[in-house]
Image (cartoon, grey):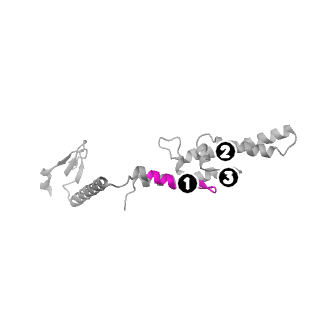
Amino acid sequence: MEQMTELDRIIKKHENEIGSIQRAITPLIEAGLTVADEDLLSLSYEGASLKGQATSIATKEAEKFKVAFRRQQEFECITTELFKIIETARNNLRKALKSDYSNPLNVNAFVIQNGIVSLSERWKENQKWIYEPEANEDRKKATFLMNKAIAAIEALNAFVADNPYIGKGVTSSTDDRRCLIWIDGEGNIHKDENNLKFI
């Protein structure tokens, strides 16, 4: 089975939280707020843009009352309720983004279209550029040599796998088992030809 690359892991990590982010913003939409990409970014902090929307909605609704006192009361009631919904959404979004952890998710990885959260294609392209730089001749050669080295190590390990006297074909200096090749802490490679007698 092919191993996941660092890029695959990062994308998967973000994809796994799409549902949580959707659940965080759905109550906002149901409350009559419009949530766009920039609102998601704002919500990951204090949600100022959504609070601005909430204030506008409350002002418009309160205008239905002619009496100033009643108008103010309605305004305060609506803003209080909407601000609570925004605060809950903010907490849920921050939880989904793992904002309080040392390696949080990138809020810019997500886009919202017609109220539906998905991963940004632009963000994915940027990540690809960061983690999988365009192949040039040197990179192609380095990849070829890396694959060749890995194949040789795997072949040597497989070759001695059934030998009860050899622990590993290739291992590190911290491994006490008998081996044919070991690598020290500085990456230097050492052949242990004395152990060939156990083959």
* Disc nearer the start of the sequence (2/1): 1
Q: Regarding mark 2 in the picture, which secondary structure is present there?
A: helix
Residue 88 in the image: state x and y as whole percent. Answer: 64, 45
Q: Residue at x 21, y 45 (%)?
A: 188
Amino acid at circle 1: Ile
Amino acid at circle 3: Ile
Q: Regarding mark 3 in the picture, which secondary structure is present there?
A: helix
User: Would you say 150 lies left or right of 34 here?
Assistant: left
Q: Are marks 2 and 3 in contact (CB under 8 Å)?
A: no
Q: Give the residues drawn in magenta, as a range.
A: 112-127
Residue reaching furthest top?
69
User: Would you say 135 lies left or right of 190 here?
Assistant: right
Viewer-nearest of discs 2 and 3: 2
Q: Are marks 2 and 1 in contact (CB under 8 Å)?
A: no
User: Would you say 8 lies left or right of 196 here?
Assistant: right
Q: Which residue is drawn at 13% across and 51% down?
A: 193
The residue labelled by disc 2 is: 50
Q: Which residue is drawn at 62% across and 44% down?
A: 90
The residue labelled by disc 3 is: 29
Q: Local crowd at mark 3 within 10 Å, few (<14), some, or many (≥20)?
A: few
Q: How far apart are marks 2 and 3 (CA)?
A: 11 Å
Amino acid at circle 2: Leu
State the image quarter where residue 72 is shown.
top right
Q: Confirm whether residue 179 shows in the render.
A: no
Q: Are marks 1 and 3 in contact (CB under 8 Å)?
A: no
* Disc nearer the start of the sequence (1/3): 1
- Look at the image and tell me in which quarter the N terminus lies: bottom left
Q: How far apart are marks 2 and 1 (CA)?
A: 20 Å
Viewer-nearest of discs 2 and 1: 2
Residue 95 in the image: state x and y as whole percent. Answer: 56, 45
The residue labelled by disc 1 is: 18
